[in-house]
Image (cartoon, rainbow, N blue to C red):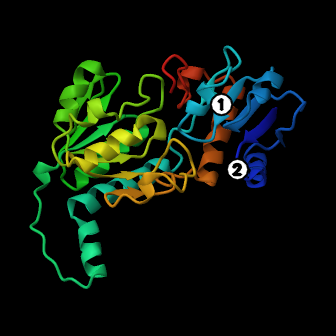
Amino acid sequence: MRVIFCCTDTKAQPWLDGLRAALPGATVELWQPDAVLADYAVVWSPPQQFFDEQTALKGIFNIGAGVDALMKLLLPAGVPVIRLDDAGMSVQMAEYVCHAVIRHFREFNGYEADTAAGKWSYRKPRVRQDFPVGVMGLGVLGQRVCRALQQFEFPVWGWSRSEKSIDGVRCFSGEAGLADFLAATRVLVCLLPLTPVTENILRRENLQRLQPGAYVINVARGGHLVDADLIALIDSGHLAGATLDVFRQEPLPPAHPFWRHPKITITPHTSARTLRTESIVQIAQKIQALHTGVAISAIAGVVQPGKGY
């Protein structure tokens, strides 16, 4: 078995060492142009040249949950693309989202500003039932976030492209359910995959449907959000603010207004980092399953190219 590794902006050696340990007997190599043909590829944002040259692949394994970069390339026909389906990311995402929701709900940003100014302040406690949290995207990460928010007794709504059912969560689906979902939401969390259908979904038309004073948390992809529309709706008072972890251009350019907006909190795409050890174990297990003839339908994380995730 030959495995080839091609991951942009990733330190290759720890991954190569880990994959070799997890796949004894396999040849695991770093991709170079004109490399020997491999059976399986482990990738993250590879160039088109990689797939043009690697014409014997039986499986493509993405080291993240999002595959939007891969979907922009011409992939070999009939070769399954398999993404990470958790590998330690869902608990990180739940931590991040709960932190952002609670920080907004408890007005900790206001307390921080007051204490920095030497002011001992008091704010009237808010009522959780007045802050329903709407989660867009109900995959592995989205469902984990919903369960975590329920522990803090927030009302939780969910919206997905196809119909889902989650205990304790009021679920909406499809274009027909989007308007009602947004109208019922005071804190919006975006965890959608980025596809042609979901690109720019966080635009004025949709954001203004949120309850007055709503708050936006985007931990999916920067392409979901129309930046200027968010700023305009915050400045108009319709939105209270936002926490953003993902951006159209990363790193975020120094001149971007998000850096200086007082009601926008930004973090450097750190809500759910790929954990190398857990990811290597999962990828190795899936490679072994595919190599030994396990049906593709029995392997978690197989991407449906028609849907883009």
Q: Nearer the viewer, residue 119 or 216?
A: 119
Q: Nearer the viewer, residue 105 or 36?
A: 105
Q: Is residue 195 left or right of residue 42?
A: left
Front of the two marks 2 and 1: 2
| Helix, strand or loop status at disc 1 | helix
Q: How many neighbours does mark 2 have within 10 angstroms: few (below 14), some (14-19), or many (20 or more)?
A: few
Tag 1: residue type?
Ala
Spatial separation of the CA atoms under disc 2 and disc 1: 25 Å
Q: Which residue is mark 2?
A: 10
Q: Which residue is mark 1?
A: 289
Residue extending farthest bottom: 118
- Name the residue located 31 percent from the left edge and 51 percent from the top edge: 148
- Name the residue located 34 percent from the left edge and 39 percent from the top edge: 229
Picture quadrant of residue 40: top right
Q: Quadrant of the N terminus?
A: top right
Number of numbered callouts drawn: 2
Tag 2: residue type?
Thr
Q: Which one is earlier in the sequence, the residue at label 2 or at label 1?
A: 2
Q: Position of residue 153 (x, y in %)?
A: 18, 53
Q: Position of residue 177 (x, y in %)?
A: 23, 23
Q: Position of residue 269 (x, y in %)?
A: 51, 52
Q: Position of residue 199 (x, y in %)?
A: 44, 29
Q: Is residue 283 visible?
A: yes
Q: How many neighbours does mark 1 have within 10 angstroms: few (below 14), some (14-19), or many (20 or more)?
A: some
